[in-house]
């Protein structure tokens, strides 16, 4: 993830049924007009995700490749499934997991993870119900 910017993803991707790329930048400020993809609106919106997320204890994954399924949820987070290593802007490993929910509304107090803030913020975005 980029400091004050999008989530950078590099894997065999399936993003809401789009399997055309191996790299993507995904919006996490909630302001993109092309959700779930970043269109640079974080700069205009002055999105801030300051500080390093607290690393979670995690063991290296036995399989570190394969498809990464990213499912935008209706008015909610990105549901991510597959071998995933989340790193901060400085390169520090935050966690390794095979399933998580990532904030895309920009309001979570636990960025990059969803904490349910999208509901109170009235976040609206296409996705699966």
Image: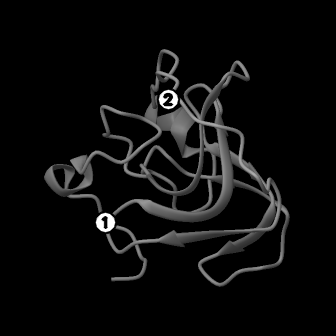
Q: Secondary structure at mark 2?
A: loop
**Residue 65 in sight:** yes
Q: Looking at the image, is 19 positioned above or below residue 84?
A: below
Dot 1, how many residues are within 10 Å of its Cα: few (below 14), some (14-19), or many (20+)? Answer: some
- The answer for how far apart the CA atoms under marks 1 and 2 are is 29 Å
- Secondary structure of the residue carrying tag 1 is loop
Q: How far across and down, in percent of the image, does residue 65 sit? A: 83, 59
Counting labels gives: 2
Horizontal side of 51 relative to 25 (left or right) equals left
* Quadrant into which the N terminus falls: top right
- Foreground mark, 1 or 2, reads 2
Query: With respect to residue 117, does 36 lie above or below?
Result: below
Mark 2 crowd level (few <14, some 14–19, many ≥20, 10 Å Cα): few
In this rendered view, identify the residue nearer to me: 70 or 20: 70
Q: Which residue is mark 2?
A: 56
At a point 81% along the width and 67% down the height, the residue shown is 66
Residue at 71% in and 40% down: 60
Q: Percent x, y for residue 101?
A: 43, 56
Q: Is residue 103 left or right of residue 117?
A: right
Q: Position of residue 61 (x, y in %)?
A: 71, 48
- The answer to whether residue 35 shows anywhere in this view is no
The residue at the point 61 percent across, 42 percent down is: 6
Q: Residue furthest top?
A: 51
The C terminus: image quadrant: bottom left
Identify the image quadrant of residue 34. Answer: bottom right
Q: How is the image coloured?
A: one colour
In front of the other: 80 or 30: 80
Q: Is residue 115 above or below residue 24?
A: above
Identify the mark nearer the N-term, 1 or 2. 2
Residue highlighted by disc 1:
124
Q: Is residue 107 left or right of residue 69?
A: left
């Amino acid at each position: 993830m980029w400091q004050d910017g999008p989530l950078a993803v590099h894997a065999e991707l399936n993003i809401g049924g789009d399997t055309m790329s191996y790299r993507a930048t995904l919006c996490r400020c909630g302001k993109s007009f092309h959700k779930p993809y970043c269109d640079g609106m974080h700069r205009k919106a002055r999105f801030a995700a300051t500080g390093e997320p607290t690393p979670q204890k995690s063991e290296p994954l036995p399989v570190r490749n394969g498809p990464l399924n990213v499912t935008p949820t209706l008015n909610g987070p990105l549901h991510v499934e597959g071998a995933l290593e989340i790193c901060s802007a400085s390169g520090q490993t935050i966690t390794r997991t095979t399933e998580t929910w990532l904030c895309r509304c920009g309001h979570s107090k636990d960025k990059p993870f969803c904490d349910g803030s999208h509901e109170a913020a009235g976040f609206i975005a296409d996705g699966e119900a």
